[in-house]
Image (cartoon, grey):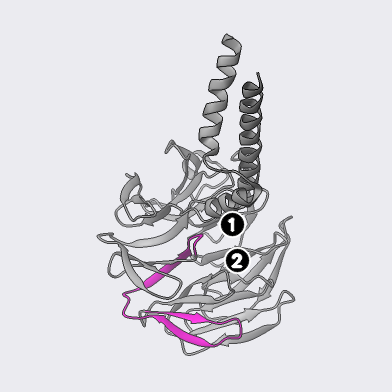
Amino acid sequence: MEKRVSIALVCVAICALAMSITSNAQAQILMQNLGNLSQTLFESDFYDGNIYEFTPGGAQSTFASGLSGPTGLAFDSAGNLFAGDVVPGYSGYIYKFTQGRAQSTFASALSDPNIPTGIDPFDLAFDNAGNLFEADLYIGSIYKYTPGGALSTFAAGLGFDGSYGLAFDSAGNLFVSDYYIGYVFKFTPGGVRSTFATGLNGPAGLAFDSAGNLFETDELSGNIYEFTPGGTRSTFATGLNGPAGLAFDSAGNLFETDELSGNIYEFTPGGTRSTFATGLNGPAGLAFDSAGNLFESDRGSGHIYEFTTNGTQSTFATGLTNPGFLAFQPVPEPSTWSLLAMGAVALLGGCRLHRSRNRDR
């Protein structure tokens, strides 16, 4: 009797977790709803030394404080946040934050004899194998860190004070824009370097479309260039005023922050331009959430603006000192939701069977 009661209690608990899922069709609805979960936004504020966290509703909290100059943000596949921190005297750090907010020093120039001049991490990016790549702002190198933290110099001899954008293509090749010498370099996963593009004028932001074409904002020329996977270059847009950040939406439209004009432009896949937002003050970083809403860090005003898919603008956050890098905490892969949904249906079915057998007795 006691055993039956225990099984019944477990079954009730499982049924409560399964909620009202009564069929495979309802499981699919659950998967859709879970896949559209809103995400938490993180922002690095360089001058006040903080990293801020924003709930989907816009509630702000200080995620980390006491940093010197937080810069690039990147999440690994486990949901841990990594943040670069530029420290005066060429002694930067990379910090790791777990989902429980536990902070640890992932990389430190002060304790690494291989980098006597120190590191000043500017941009961060993960490859598919979980290795972290860091573009150093001042010494023209790209560093690679394994998931366990082992450091190696992935690339050296880039333009001094000029390693900016990082972007991976679908094959795992790393592309780096070198602002001051006007190059884009390509690195194979094994570290073999080739010059992908030359003769650029202030290359900064990089982004790939779904077809594997690379787009690059040429800040000083006011152009956006498109490169095929083979390296053929064409001019995608001209007449811009300080193009900086790039981001693609799920439909393949390209969005660009025009820092000096205070606009955000939208480009269709065919290159047709329209003004998506105007009247901004130093627009910089761009990021899309899983629902397709666009977020923009506005350096001059200290705001973060949110734009719905139809372009409606609202103020998401105010009172920031120098909002820069934006990053959304990733949501689990659809396969994870699929397993949860199917498991919930199976568990509920087991509960029904158990209840049916009890009635038969």
What span is colored magenta in the figure? Answer: 263-291
The single residue placed furthest to the left in the displayed view is: 319
Spot occupied by residue 319 in the image (x, y as percentages of width and height): 25, 60
Q: Give the structural element (helix, strand or loop) at label 2.
A: strand
Q: Is residue 285 above or below residue 340?
A: below
Q: Quadrant of the N terminus?
A: top right
Residue that label 2 marks: 176
Q: Quadrant of the C terminus?
A: top right
**Would residue 178 be seen by someone viewing this image from the given angle?**
no
Q: Depth check: give the residue in front, 113 or 69.
A: 69
Which mark's residue is nearer the viewer, 1 or 2? 2
Asked if marks 1 and 2 touch (Cβ < 8 Å), the reply is yes
Q: Is residue 311 above or below residue 234?
A: above
Spot occupied by residue 8 in the image (x, y as percentages of width and height): 57, 21
Q: Is residue 187 above or below residue 242?
A: above
Spot occupied by residue 192 in the image (x, y as percentages of width and height): 73, 60
- Residue in the picture at 55% in, 61% down: 140
Q: Give the structural element (helix, strand or loop) at label 1.
A: strand
Inspect the image, locate mark 1, and give the three-letter code of the amino acid beneath it.
Ile
**Would residue 313 be seen by someone viewing this image from the given angle?**
yes
On residue 142, the disc is 1
Q: Residues within 10 Å of mark 1 (few under 14, many from 20)?
A: many
